[in-house]
Amino acid sequence: MIDIKRIAREQLAVQGGAALSLRAIARELGIVSSAMYRYVPSRDELLTMLIEDAYNSLGDAAAAADETCERADLVGRWKAVGTAVRDWAVASPSEYALLYGSPVPGYAAPPERTVAPGSRVTLLLVGLVDAAESAYDGPNPPVPPTVRADLDGIREGLGVRADDDLLARAILAWTALFGLVSFELFGQFAGGVHDHAAHFDHQLDRLALLIGLSGPANMSV
Amino acid sequence: MIDIKRIAREQLAVQGGAALSLRAIARELGIVSSAMYRYVPSRDELLTMLIEDAYNSLGDAAAAADETCERADLVGRWKAVGTAVRDWAVASPSEYALLYGSPVPGYAAPPERTVAPGSRVTLLLVGLVDAAESAYDGPNPPVPPTVRADLDGIREGLGVRADDDLLARAILAWTALFGLVSFELFGQFAGGVHDHAAHFDHQLDRLALLIGLSGPANMSV
DNA sequence: CTGGCCTTGAGAGCACTGCTCACTAAAGTG
DNA sequence: CACTTTAGTGAGCAGTGCTCTCAAGGCCAG
């Protein structure tokens, strides 16, 4: 019964992750609660499955958006992927919260099942940065040794060639991107920002500059 | 009985916000569960009180860190406040999650009681930016009209005079700061970044450059 | 066609949750 | 002394995850 996951997602949407209830799903299905355990080992396992699906759904959306762009149009790809991430998040806020919000109490996602699908967007963005001849000509603060070591590990783990400064700026941009989405979804922008889409798009432009995907010259309007 | 809040915070620390249980607190207090309602109107109300306290605790920490700096040392103040925010967050991760993580299912914090204490850090950072003669001389993307309108509203609401570009960069830096903390606490950096403190500090340097608190010249090592 | 098996589900039960209500015992107050 | 407030009890309702036993129904070999 894949219906379980469908109804679980519906329930997720209206009341959030931590309140996911097997009994409520069973009720919706016209089934007694104990019968759920024929199909789902536990509530936590169901949660893990939903997280996997959500990561893959997000990854698919990001990859699809990337595909629509010219491979050489790095700014276009960056913005397309970023916009896809935000669009996906606003379309399924509770699933986004499941992935990037505070962890569900008493539940820890098993890393061996979530880091791989969870890295898809990151890999996409990193690959994008790596393809760039960074046009960033602004200042860079000195990189302390321990940070340098971490960057070395990341460079190796991801198989990219970007130098320390570019890599650090890419991490910052990646973090800022999700920070923007999180602030929007979790209400931190409430009252201040109204046209979230436009604001996000604008900040995406700024981040593109930070990474050096675009110079001051070729800027999207 | 202020013990309730103390035990609530302990419970919060070990099992997270959504699992906050009045009965468990009562048990810890050696009291029957219904007696809790003499002191606390409801679980949600207790949650709200904890959120208020947490915002104020964070605000105090940030303000105290700010006080230790020369008023004119904007980079120092920015880094002190940023570091204080992160330190507070790693010291009380569940309280941070309560404030900046995904909302607790079935619970919405009453804005009239949380936006004021929640704005303290923001106001501090904004005031900091506003005191700066921004040394940023990098490129700025064009600001679309709707974003401009939002920025106008923010400028008025916060009572600052920063121009659109500086204000937008400040918002980006503010968002990135909390994005960094959230990624660290919620495990998104797991595997890649090990010396989180050093990494955060380094990115704080980069954000200081983005805001223009420091020029390429006067950079902290 | 019959016997056995395996799947699907029912229902009871345990321990937990928030919350309400009626009630009691003590302490303070006029 | 009488009255009121305070603190706390214990039962009960409706919900949760999860385990257990048991009963029908479908399917397949002999």
Image (spheres, coloured by chain):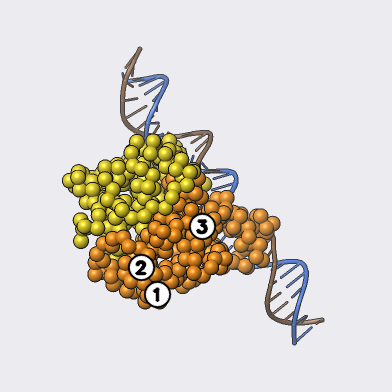
Chain colours: A yellow, B orange, C blue, D brown
Which residue is found at the position 57% from the left and 65% from the top? B68
In terms of secondary structure, where does tag 1 sit? loop
Which residue is found at the position 50% from the left and 64% from the top? B77
Asked if both marks, 3 and 2, belong to the same chain, the answer given is yes
The reply, left or right, for residue A23 in relation to residue A10 is right
As displayed, is residue B120 above or below residue A45? below
The quarter of the rendered structure image containing the N terminus of chain B is: bottom right
The reply, left or right, for residue A176 in relation to residue B66 is left
**Percent x, y of residue D6:** 69, 72
**Percent x, y of residue A14:** 37, 56
Q: Which label belongs to residue B167?
A: 2
Residue that numbered label 1 is attached to: B160
> Chain for mark 2?
B
Residue that numbered label 3 is attached to: B83
Of the two numbered discs 3 and 2 on the same chain, state the one appearing first in sequence: 3
State the CA–CA distance, disc 3 to disc 1.
24 Å
In terms of secondary structure, where does tag 3 sit? helix
Residue B136: tell me if it is visible: yes
